[in-house]
Image (cartoon, rainbow, N blue to C red):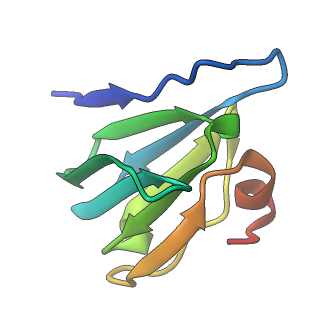
Amino acid sequence: MDKSSKQTGGNTSTTSVRIVVRATADSFIAVRTAENKPLFSQLMRPGDRYEVSSGANLILDTGNAGGLAISIGNKSAPALGFQGQIRRNILLNAINLLQGAN
C-alpha cells in the first residue's frame, strides 16, 4: 500500500518542482516550516512517500538518513546519510539537495 501526503503552498510558480521523499527502509521523518510549525511527522515504511514543492521553505529531520531516497523532478539527489544516521535541519530545497549541500 502506498501512503502519500502532499504539501501544497499558496504561491506556486512555473519554476517550482516537486521534491519526493521516499522511504527505502523504516525511517522516522518530521517536516516543519522555517517558523517551526510542524507539518508532518511519521514513521515511514519502505515505499511510503512524502511530496512537497521546492519553494515551500520546509525543513526535514530524520532518524534514518540512509533509509530515504530523495528525487527532484526526474533526478535523484545524493544520499542524505548512512543507515541509522540522525540528520536534522535539512532544507527541502531542490538546488541544495541535488548538490548534496545539506
For residue 25, say whether it is visible: no
| On-image quarter of the C terminus | bottom right
Please report the residue visible at 43 percent of the width from the left and 53 percent of the height from the top: 32
Left or right of 12 on screen, residue 92: left
Left or right of 102 on screen, residue 15: right
| Quarter residue 85 falls in | bottom left
| Quarter residue 77 falls in | bottom right
| Quarter residue 74 falls in | top right
Counting the numbered discs, the total is 0
Residue lying furthest front: 35
Near-viewer residue (85 or 83): 85
Residue 79 locus on image (x, y percent): 58, 67
Task: Relative to 81, say whether 10 is above or below.
Answer: above
Residue 43 locus on image (x, y percent): 18, 56
Residue 20 locus on image (x, y percent): 51, 39
Please report the residue visible at 42 percent of the width from the left and 59 percent of the height from the top: 68
| On-image quarter of the N terminus | top left
Please report the residue visible at 53 percent of the width from the left and 71 percent of the height from the top: 89
Task: Relative to 46, say whether 8 is above or below.
Answer: above
For residue 13, say whether it is visible: yes
Left or right of 54 on screen, residue 21: left
Please report the residue visible at 30 percent of the width from the left and 28 percent of the height from the top: 4
Task: Relative to 83, say whether 26 is above or below.
Answer: above
Left or right of 11 on screen, residue 90: left
Task: Relative to 37, say whether 10 is above or below.
Answer: above
